[in-house]
Amino acid sequence: MGYKILISPRAQSELENIADYYARNSSIAPQLFIAKIKEAYDKLEKNPFYRIQYKRIRAVKIKKFPYSLYYIIHEEKYQVCILSCFHNKRDPQKRPGK
């Protein structure tokens, strides 16, 4: 049984802002970004047990983009809750859960 992906309002807003940013600079980049996000969701549905970054919060990098999805796992419900999409070069003290 695969895990269900839940996206927090914060993460949804961040993803939309990132796609909008890429849309201002390229016609292809937003589509590629969305495709890579979907790939990350597929990976998380199959196996969400990536390294813990802080307390219960885990992260998976988005291929070809400088972002990571931060999430927590609700094992009893088979759910993965995406908390944030965070730029890898930003101040680490501002990462979700810090």
Image: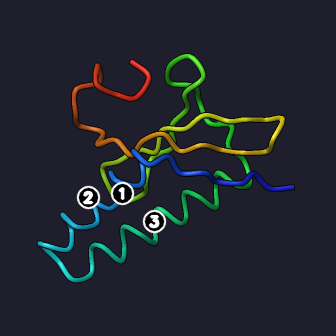
Q: Amino acid at mark 1?
A: Leu
The residue at 51%/37% (across/down) is: 59
Mark 1 crowd level (few <14, some 14–19, many ≥20, 10 Å Cα): some
Mark 3 or 2 closer to N-term?
2
Q: Amino acid at mark 2?
A: Asn
Residue linked to disc 1: 15
Q: Which mark is residue 36?
A: 3
Apparent side of residue 1 relative to residue 89 in the rendered image (left or right): right
How far across and how far down the image is residue 19, in percent?
28, 66
**Alpha carbon of mark 3 to alpha carbon of mark 2: how far?**
16 Å
**Alpha carbon of mark 2 to alpha carbon of mark 1: how far?**
5 Å
The residue at 35%/77% (across/down) is: 31
The residue at 27%/58% (across/down) is: 18
Mark 3 crowd level (few <14, some 14–19, many ≥20, 10 Å Cα): some
Q: Which mark is residue 17?
A: 2
Q: Are marks 1 and 3 in contact (CB under 8 Å)?
A: no
Q: Residue 5 or 69: which is nearer the viewer?
A: 5
Mark 2 crowd level (few <14, some 14–19, many ≥20, 10 Å Cα): few
Apparent side of residue 98 relative to residue 47 in the rendered image (left or right): left
Q: Amino acid at mark 3?
A: Lys
Q: Is residue 62 above or below residue 72?
A: below
How far across and how far down the image is residue 91, in percent?
22, 26
Q: Is residue 57 above or below residue 83?
A: above
Q: Are marks 2 and 1 in contact (CB under 8 Å)?
A: yes
- State the image quarter where residue 97 is shown: top left
Mark 1 or 3 closer to N-term?
1
